Image (cartoon, rainbow, N blue to C red):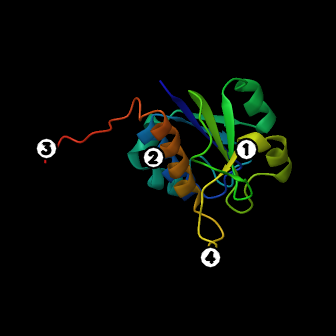
Amino acid sequence: MVELNIVLLEPEIPQNTGNIGRICNAMGSSLHLIEPLGFSIEDKYLKRAGLDYWKDLNVKSYKDYGQFLAQNPQGQKVFLSKKAGVRCDRLPYSNTVYLIFGKESVGLPEQLLLENKDTCVRVPISVCSRSLNLANAVAILSYEVMRQHRFTGLKAQGDLSL
C-alpha cells in the first residue's frame, strides 16, 4: 500500500489549500500544513473549495519545517520546483512519500532545494509559462506517484460497461 503525504510549506491562498484537500481526499492521503499559513484553517474560502471533504481529511499542522521533519523522519521527501532538473515522471517514488510544495508566491526556499537536489522534481511546462497553479501541481504529482504504484488503493475502474 502507498502512503502518500502532501506537504504545503507556508501556503498563502485558502482556495488552493481547499482544493488540495479535495485532492488528498481522492488519493487517500494526508495533508501536512507548515506554518505560517496565509489564512486561518477556519477560512470560509478554504472550506468552500474543500467542500464537504474537509471534515474527512487527515490534516496535520506544524510550527515550522524542523518540527515537520522531527515528527516525520521516515519516508521519501520529494520537493517540487520549476528549478529542478529531473522530470516528475523520472523519479521512482517509494511506498511512503512526502511531496513537498512551497508557497504560491515564491515556491520552496533555495537552500532547501540545494540540500535536497537528488529528490527535487519538476513538472514540464511550456517555455511561455512561468508556473502552474499549486493545486494543479499537487494533482499532477499525486497521480504520478499513484501511477507508478499502479493506483493501488484507488478505485481505478468505472462501473459502466461499454
Label 3 vs label 1: CA separation? 47 Å
| Marking on residue 128 | 4
Task: Judge depth for marks 2 and 3 and give the one in front.
Answer: 3
Please name the amino acid that badge 1 sits on.
Glu
For the point 60% across and 45% down, which residue is it?
A: 90
Left of 90 or right of it: where is 64?
Answer: right
Classify 124 as above or below 86. Answer: below
For mark 4, does the 10 Å Cα neighbourhood hold few (<14), some (14 to 19), or many (20 or more) residues?
Answer: few
Q: Quadrant of residue 77?
A: top right
For the point 32% across and 36% down, which residue is it?
A: 155
Classify 65 as above or below 12. Answer: above
Residue under circle 1?
A: 35
Residue under circle 2?
A: 22
Task: Judge depth for marks 2 and 4 and give the one in front.
Answer: 4
> Residue 20's x, y, as percent?
52, 49
Q: Quadrant of residue 100?
A: top right
Q: Are marks 2 and 1 in contact (CB under 8 Å)?
A: no
Classify 151 as above or below 140. Answer: above
Mark 3 or mark 4, earlier in chain:
4
Task: Judge depth for marks 2 and 1 and give the one in front.
Answer: 2
Nearer to us in this view, 25 or 80: 80
**Secondary element at tag 2:** helix
Q: Are marks 2 and 4 in contact (CB under 8 Å)?
A: no
Mark 2 or mark 3, earlier in chain:
2
Residue under circle 3?
A: 161
For mark 3, does the 10 Å Cα neighbourhood hold few (<14), some (14 to 19), or many (20 or more) residues?
Answer: few
